[in-house]
Image (tube, rainbow, N blue to C red):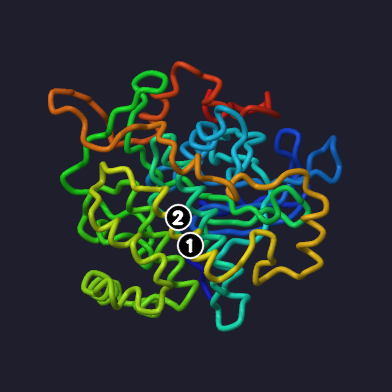
Amino acid sequence: MSVEVTAESEHSSWVDFKPGRRFGKWRIKNKLDEGGFGQVYRVEHIQQRGRYAALKAEPNDTEGGSAIKLEIMVINFLNRDGDKPHVVKLFHAAKHKKFSYMIVTLLGENLRTLKISCPEEYLSVETWSRIGIQCLYSIKLLHDIGFVHRDIKPANFVMGHESDVEQARCVHILDFGLARNYAFEKRKGHWIARRARRSAEFRGTMRYCSPSVHEKKEQGRKDDIWSLIYLLIEMHCGLPWQHERDKERLEIKKMNISDKDLLSHFPEELHPIVSHLRNLNCYNRPDYTMIHKCFLKLIKRIDVHYDDRYDWESDLQVQYVLKHRKKRPEYEHAEEFFASDPIKVNGPPPAELNMRRSNKTAEDLEEMMANNSSLLKAKTHHSQQKKTLNS
């Protein structure tokens, strides 16, 4: 029997690493995951035994180019004023001839996997309501540096690793390969909206993308919130189009369903969020405070507390974390954060402003960050043997 070697399998072999291979000061232990062209591995620090991280690698000649360069820049931009909650730390990154890689915080399970492990593959409202606040916090962190994610879904929210008591119960936002900047920082603290395209190609995941994506409209901050709402409805009771495999029929169902039917089994406290999103365009800033308050009303009614266990946790796991962690998470008292507006963009750029821009987000981000070149590099543990990704 002959076996055809496809371009994808050939590309994947370039990032198929054996245990023991060294990358800078890190060494491959085992493979964690693979998807598309990329691979994810658990690595151990050579000099600090027992210190683990995650290595993500992609071939350089994948269609559309490797997304790792963009991911590295977004992570560094997120952490430019200090490490942020809900965001991984970048330890090392490099570009080889045929592949690029980055080494980041080792995390635990993603929300998709955790949902599947629960009875009937649903999460209790006591769990997803608190997780929803963390997801909203994570999304706003990205929005506050001028970016939209454009692929919000359960697989891109990941809990901290169980061995890390400070982060074990913290949701982390991942995979910025489809992110796009909706605003430019012309100078420190002064932002201008990026002009919307007349028609935008599909970006995202069909099940969770907003109505605007189906209409080929430019995505804004509201579209990430739409995806979050769809994600939470799925976790609570399932989406009306959840089992639809035909893309056209899925789109028809999503675009024609009324808000009343969409939200018929969803807690009433969150219904105002959808009405709010319907009234926003791609330039408008969502009312994060109002959205946060909707979650708080729900949490108050069902009488759940932040220290209560999640569906996938045991009482012993929670007790251990609560006993050993040194501080409470920031999302528990986030009113000031959700009210803050560092971007101050709520409409299109001035008509007379002539901004010549490419469609390549990585290039735009490099220009935005040019005044602080250190942000374009992994902050620690660089290899001197290979060219760093952003040098």
Numbered circles on residues, count: 2
Counting from the top left corner in percent of width and height, residue 190 is at: 35, 23
Q: Residue at x 68, y 23 (%)?
A: 384
**Residue 92 visible at all:** yes
Residue type marked 1: Lys
Q: Which residue is mark 1?
A: 297
Q: Quick check: 306 left or right of 290?
A: right
Q: Residue at x 41, y 41 (%)?
A: 143
Q: Residues within 10 Å of mark 1 (few under 14, many from 20)?
A: some
Counting from the top left corner in percent of width and height, residue 343 is at: 37, 32
Give me the C-alpha separation between circle 1 and circle 2.
6 Å
Mark 1: which secondary structure? helix
Q: Quick check: 206 left or right of 324?
A: left
Q: Residue at x 44, y 36 (%)?
A: 340
Image position of 287 with respect to 193: above or below: below
Q: Quick check: 390 left or right of 277?
A: right
Q: Which residue is mark 2?
A: 293
Query: Is disc 1 in contact with disc 2, using a CB cutoff of under 8 Å?
Result: yes
Q: Residues within 10 Å of mark 2 (few under 14, many from 20)?
A: some
